[in-house]
Image (cartoon, helix red, strand yellow):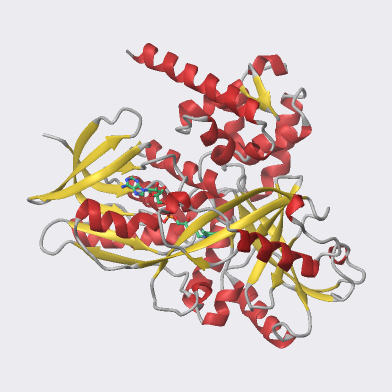
Amino acid sequence: MSQVFDIFVIGGGINGCGIARDAAGRGYSVCLAEMNDLGSGTSSWSTKLIHGGLRYLEHYEFRLVREALIEREVLLNMAPHIIWPLRFVLPHHKGMRPAWLLRLGLFLYDHLGGRKILPPTRVLDLRSDTAGGPLKDEFTKAFEYSDCWVNDARLVVLNAMDARAKGAEISTRTKVVSAKKGGELWEIDLQAADTGAMRRVSARVIVNAGGPWVDDILRTSIGENEARNVRLVQGSHIVVRKKFEHPKAYFFQNSDERIFFAIPYEQDFTLIGTTDQDFHGDPSNVKISDEEISYLCDGASHYFKEPVTRDDIVWTYSGVRPLYDDGASKAQEATRDYVLRTDGGAGPKVINVFGGKITTYRRLAESMLEKVEAAIGGKGAPWTRASVLPGGEFGVSGFTDLLSKVRADYPFLETSQSERLVRSYGLKVFEILGEARSSEGLGEDFGHGLTEAEVRYLMKNEWAQTAADVVWRRSKLGIRFTPEQTARLDTFMREHKQLQKFAAE
Ligand SMILES: Cc1cc2nc3c(=O)[nH]c(=O)nc-3n(C[C@H](O)[C@H](O)[C@H](O)COP(=O)(O)OP(=O)(O)OC[C@H]3O[C@@H](n4cnc5c(N)ncnc54)[C@H](O)[C@@H]3O)c2cc1C
C-alpha cells in the first residue's frame, strides 16, 4: 500500500511552499513535489517587491491592495533578513497621471492597511534631493513612498525548510505525472527527474499550485477540467551596471500608461522592469524579446540623464505570470488577485490556485487551508501571521547588530561577503561559518565569496543540487561568475553528491 498523506501539493513555488508550511504547522501530513528546483518557476523571476501595488488602485482592486499592504509588515517581521524596506521615487511630469490622482492614490496607500514600521509618503524637490541627480532636469518634482524588497527565491526555500521542520515531505526534481481517483483517495504517480524512477503515493486532497502549469496539470495529469483558467503573461527585466548611487528605487510611468521600476540590485547593478505581454508556449522556455529590451531601454532613457543602452545590459530574465483569466482586454489590466477553486465532483477533491502575488502568498495559504478544511476536515487554527521564517529570529531592528556580531566573530570575511551572508541566512549564518577562524577554514573558494562551507550547507539543508541552484536561486552570484567558475562549482557539487550517496548506502 502506498504512503497516505492528508494533503499532496503540486508545485514548489511560493504558493505551494507557503501552503505546505501552513498545513504542516496545523498538523496535517503533507507531501510536496516540485518537478525542478524550488522556486525555479515564476517565483524567482519576479520584480522582487513586497508591495501593495499602487497601480492596482486604478483598476479598483481595493481588496487585493489592502491585503497586500497589510502583508508588507507581516512578512517584514517574518523574514527581516531577506525582506527590507525600500523607498520609491515617483517623478511627476505633465502629460502623465495628474498630481491630484497620484496624491489620492498615495494617500490611500498610506492609510488602507496596517502601516506601523514603514515611513509615509512625502513630496520631493528633485532639484535639490539626491534622487533628482541621475534624472533629466525636466523632472523637478516627485512623490516618495514605501514598499519592501524581497529575495524571492530564498523566500520560497525558507518556507519549504519550515514546512519540512514541521513534518512535511518536500521532494524536489520530482514530477507529478498522473493523479487518479481510487475510492476516497487520490493515487499519485511521481517520477524522479534524475533516475526516471517511479513512485506512487496517496492523498486525501490535492492542492494544485502549478503556477503557469496549473491548467496543464489539471488537463493532462489529473484529467479533471478542460477550461482555460489562467492567462499567461510574460514579464521581463534587464539588469544593467549601477545607474545611481543612492539606495532608493524609481517608479517610472511610461507613455503607454504602463509603469516600470528601476531598483538598486546586488550592490553594483540596477534592475529595470517589467513588461506585460501575452505568452503562448511552454513557460520553461520564456525568454526576453528584442522588443522588450528596446521598450525597457527606451523607457528608462526617457528619465535618466545617461541613456540606458543594450551595451549596459549584463543580464536579463523573464517569467510567466499565471493570472486568473478575468477576460480583461489588455495583459497589464488582468487582475493580480487570486482565485482558489475546488474541482473533483463527488470523489476526492483537487483545489487549484489561479493567480496570486508573492506578496499575498501567506494569506493565500490561509484561504487554501479553509478550502482544505471543507474538503477533508479541520486540524489546527491559522498560525503563520506572527511566525518567523528560518534565520529571521533576530527581529526587524536587529539586522545591524547581527551584522556587527558576524563581523566581530569572523573578522576575516570581506565586507560584502559578510553582508551577503547575513542577508541570505540571518541567524543561520552561524551554522555555515561554525568554528572557522580564517578563510581557509571555510574550504574551497569558488569565487566572489562563495565557499565550500556555504555550498555544503545549501546541499544539506536547502535542496541545492546543481551550480544553477546555488548561483541563480539560493544566491544571485551568477551575475558575477565566469563560465569556468560555474563549471568548477558544478563539478564540486556532483562529486559531493556522489560521496553523500555512497555514505548513505
Ligand atoms: C515578471 C514578473 C514580476 C513579478 N513581480 C512581482 C512582485 O514584484 N511582487 C509580487 O508579489 N509578485 C510578483 N510577481 C508574481 C509572482 O511572481 C507570482 O505570482 C508567483 O511567483 C507565483 O507563484 P506560484 O507558486 O503560483 O508559481 P510558480 O513559482 O511558477 O511555481 C509553480 C511550480 O510548479 C512546478 N510544477 C509544474 N508542474 C509540475 C508537475 N507536474 N509536477 C511537479 N511540479 C510541477 C513548477 O516547476 C513550478 O516551480 C511577478 C511575476 C512576474 C512574472
Q: In which quadrant of the rendered view does residue 344 lie? A: bottom left
Residue 52 in percent (x, y) is at 57, 68
Foreground of the two, 99 or 320: 320
Foreground of the two, 129 or 23: 129
Please state the quadrant of the image where ligand 1 appears. Answer: bottom left
Up-down: is 6 above or below 381?
above
Foreground of the two, 489 or 311: 311
Q: Is residue 307 left or right of residue 86?
A: right
Q: Is residue 243 left or right of residue 11?
A: right
Position of the N terminus by quadrant:
top left
Residue found at x 61% / y 31%: 429
Up-down: is 7 above or below 147?
above
Residue 226 in percent (x, y) is at 23, 65
Q: Is residue 88 visible?
A: no
Residue found at the very far right of the displayed protein: 128
Foreground of the two, 132 or 22: 132
Residue found at x 40% / y 53%: 282
Residue 424 in percent (x, y) is at 61, 39
